[in-house]
Amino acid sequence: MERQRILDDAESEKARKELLTLQGESAAVESTGQAKAEAHSRAEAAKIEAIAAVEAAELKAKAMRIEADSELERLKAARDAEIHILTEQNRLEVEKSEKMANIESTKFQAMVDAIGTETIRSIASGPQDHQVKMLQALGLKSTLITDGKNPVNLFNTAQGLLGTKWPQNESDA
């Protein structure tokens, strides 16, 4: 009986040893599986993050491209508007200048027609007093006419233009 018990205990210890070995192997398989699953999940997470980063970069590049295109369109529209305004201003300035030239030409022609070619010829070739009367008739207040051969005394000329006489000596003062 004692022997049987020792044999049973030995058998029990063998079974227990086998159980522990199997439990160890099971734990090793379990931890390996768990490590493998964790590694797989980390790799999958890294893959998903990389794909998301690539998509984010593509979207950011697309947004920047759209922004740049819209800024370019805005600048182009502003430049076109500025060119249009400057063109219109230049056209109006040319039109104004043409109208002013026409007005001046018409005014000069009307003055020549009013005075007449004979009168202008008389003014150009007539005596000085006749010229003075003709110029006064035109409404001119003061005029200096010279033949260019004799020098002009500007002091005496200025007295005549002002209409007052300057004292010649101290007794006139």
Image (cartoon, helix red, strand yellow):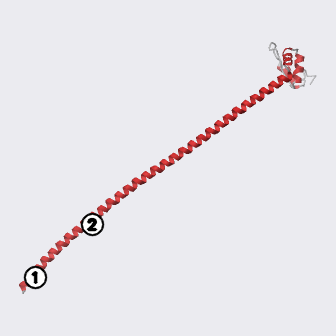
SS at badge 1 = helix
Q: Residue at x 21, y 70 (%)?
A: 26
Q: Amino acid at mark 1?
A: Asp
Using the image as rendered, state which of residue 87 and residue 39 is in the foreground. Answer: 87
Crowdedness near tag 1: few (<14), some (14–19) or many (≥20) residues, C-alpha within 10 Å: few
Residue at the disc numbered 2 = 34
| Residue closest to the eye, 110 or 32 | 110
In the displayed image of the protein, which residue is found farthest to the top?
A: 149
Rounded to the nearest angstrom, the CA distance separating label 1 from label 2 is 37 Å
Mark 2 packing: few (<14 Cα in 10 Å), some, or many (20+)?
Answer: few
| Quadrant in the picture for residue 146 | top right
User: Which secondary structure lies at badge 2?
Assistant: helix
Tell me which residue sits at (62%, 40%) in the image: 82
Where residue 6 sits in the image (x, y, percent)?
8, 82
Q: Picture coordinates of residue 21 (x, y %)?
A: 17, 72
Corner quadrant of residue 132 = top right
Image coords of residue 161 (percent x, y): 86, 24
Compared with residue 14, is residue 72 higher up or lower down, i.e. above or below?
Answer: above
Residue occupying the point 48% across, 49% down: 64
According to the picture, the residue beneath numbered tag 1 turns out to be 8
Residue 141 coordinates in the image, percent (x, y): 87, 26
Does residue 25 appear in this view? Answer: yes
Residue type, mark 2 in image: Gln
Question: Left or right: where does residue 13 sit relative to residue 171?
Answer: left
Please give the label number shown on residue 57.
none
Quadrant for the N terminus in the image: bottom left
Nearer-N-terminus badge (1/2)? 1
